């Protein structure tokens, strides 16, 4: 028996599909990321509205927390995305991110920066939700990255010849600059950078007269107000800025190093009350140091040494980690790839995001079974049409 559709039903469907763009945009602003994806599938009109919201940087609700993206197998292409707001884990196949030939090196603004060895060495930005991709120029200065593929587990040791990357803006922005810092010849620093529109990498070399025993490989890098900062294995912090007036390099000298072992952790902090962006350099059993990130690289450096019992900007991780969203002042995507892991459980509805915790050793306990990369990613749908060629 065939069901009949009344003219009223047809008219109601037509009304919903023909809503003006303005109310559709208002609806989109109130939706979380998963609901935005569902919104796209309603009809062509709604999909068209979502493609232009917001047109420059992709879709993401302002209150959406970052998702923790991990792989549990060293060769598989299956990735899991843990959503702290719903405590759910979503698994999906991402063929472009095969663990046997690719490594994640950075996550910012909803984009992953990926190194791939096949069919030839390459670097590219990738959005795992929409499959949008932007290929970067390659340089032989990064040839040491092929050694990353030999590591089955994410190592805590970062070798001199493997560059550490930082990003100044979303790769779709004309202001985007990609930086890479590499140490070589025991006393030299190579800073490579590629601006949006460049067809090749530019390189600056810095020689710092520091004994090799105090000259360690890079642990982490970040950009703020056009200034590139990086933190070494022993907790030393350096800064570099390239401008029309020339280049400027600074070494934030301290009385003594934080650590001689690879336990230094650094992350960015938004202090809303003081209106400052800071870098916290932390080492277990040592006094943490908070550095106010500069507006001008020539400004005086502010370094605050916190007492060991001071909880300011401290990651108060219990033994089982966080089961709630991160502190509002913490920028989770300022951590290096491989710094975090999640613990999960399973019920009738699927996998649950139980908690997340710092990855302090080469491997997690058997309850986590992490053997691949892990990274926090901003949940955004980047329209593939926005992923125009880097040098176009």
Image (spheres, rainbow, N blue to C red):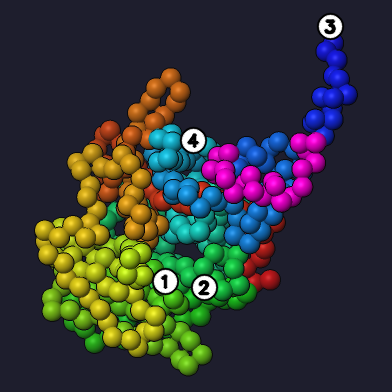
Residue 217 visible in the displayed image: no
How far apart, in angstroms, are the residues tagged by discs 1 and 4? 31 Å
How far apart, in angstroms, are the residues tagged by discs 3 and 1? 65 Å
The reply to whether callout 1 and callout 2 are in contact (CB within 8 Å) is yes
SS for callout 4: strand
Determine which quarter of the picture holds residue 312. Answer: bottom left
Q: Position of residue 219 (x, y in %)?
A: 30, 65
Of pointers 1 and 2, the one earlier in the residue sequence = 2
SS for callout 1: strand
Badge 2: residue crowd in 10 Å (few <14, some 14–19, many ≥20): many
Q: Position of residue 191 (x, y in %)?
A: 41, 78
> Does 389 sit left or right of 209 as displayed?
right
Of pointers 4 and 3, the one earlier in the residue sequence = 3
Region in magenta: 15-35
Instruction: Tell which residue pokes out farthest to the top in this image.
Output: 1
**Which dot marks residue 51?**
none
The reply to whether callout 4 and callout 3 are in contact (CB within 8 Å) is no
> Does 94 sit left or right of 329 as displayed?
right
Quadrant of the rendering where the C terminus is positioned:
bottom right
**Which dot marks residue 91?**
4
Give the residue at mark 2.
177
Give the residue at mark 3.
1
Q: Is residue 72 above or below residue 373?
A: above
Residue 228 visible in the displayed image: yes
Total numbered labels: 4
**Which dot marks residue 223?**
1
């Amino acid at each position: 028996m065939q069901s009949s559709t009344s003219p009223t039903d047809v008219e109601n469907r037509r009304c919903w599909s023909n809503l003006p763009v303005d109310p559709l945009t208002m609806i989109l602003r109130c939706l979380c990321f998963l609901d935005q994806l569902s919104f796209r599938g309603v009809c062509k009109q709604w999909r068209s509205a979502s493609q232009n919201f917001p047109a420059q940087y992709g879709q993401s609700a302002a209150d959406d927390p970052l998702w923790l993206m991990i792989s549990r197998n060293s060769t598989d292409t299956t990735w899991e995305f843990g959503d702290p707001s719903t405590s759910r884990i979503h698994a999906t196949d991402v063929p472009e991110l095969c663990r046997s030939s690719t490594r994640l090196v950075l996550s910012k603004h909803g984009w992953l920066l990926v190194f791939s060895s096949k069919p030839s060495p390459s670097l590219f930005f990738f959005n795992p939700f929409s499959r949008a991709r932007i290929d970067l120029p390659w340089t032989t200065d990064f040839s040491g990255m092929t050694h990353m593929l030999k590591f089955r587990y994410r190592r805590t040791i970062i070798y001199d010849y493997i560059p550490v990357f930082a990003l100044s803006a979303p790769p779709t922005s004309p202001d985007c600059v990609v930086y890479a810092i590499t140490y070589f010849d025991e006393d030299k620093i190579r800073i490579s950078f590629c601006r949006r529109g460049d067809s090749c990498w530019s390189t600056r070399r810095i020689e710092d007269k520091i004994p090799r025993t105090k000259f360690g490989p890079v642990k982490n890098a970040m950009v703020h107000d056009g200034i590139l900062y990086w933190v070494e294995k022993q907790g030393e912090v350096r800064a570099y800025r390239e401008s029309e007036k020339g280049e400027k390099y600074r070494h934030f000298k301290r009385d003594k190093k934080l650590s001689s072992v690879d336990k230094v952790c650094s992350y960015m902090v938004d202090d809303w009350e003081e209106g400052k962006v800071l870098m916290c350099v932390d080492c277990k059993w040592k006094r943490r140091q908070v550095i106010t990130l500069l507006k001008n690289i020539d400004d005086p450096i502010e370094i605050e040494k916190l007492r060991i019992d001071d909880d300011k900007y401290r990651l108060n991780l219990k033994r089982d980690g966080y089961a709630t969203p991160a502190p509002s002042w913490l920028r989770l995507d300022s951590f290096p790839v491989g710094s975090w892991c999640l613990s999960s459980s399973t019920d009738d509805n699927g996998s649950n995001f139980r908690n997340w915790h710092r990855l302090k050793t080469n491997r997690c306990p058997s309850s986590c079974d992490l053997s691949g990369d892990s990274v926090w990613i901003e949940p955004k749908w980047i329209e593939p049409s926005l992923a125009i060629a880097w040098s176009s």
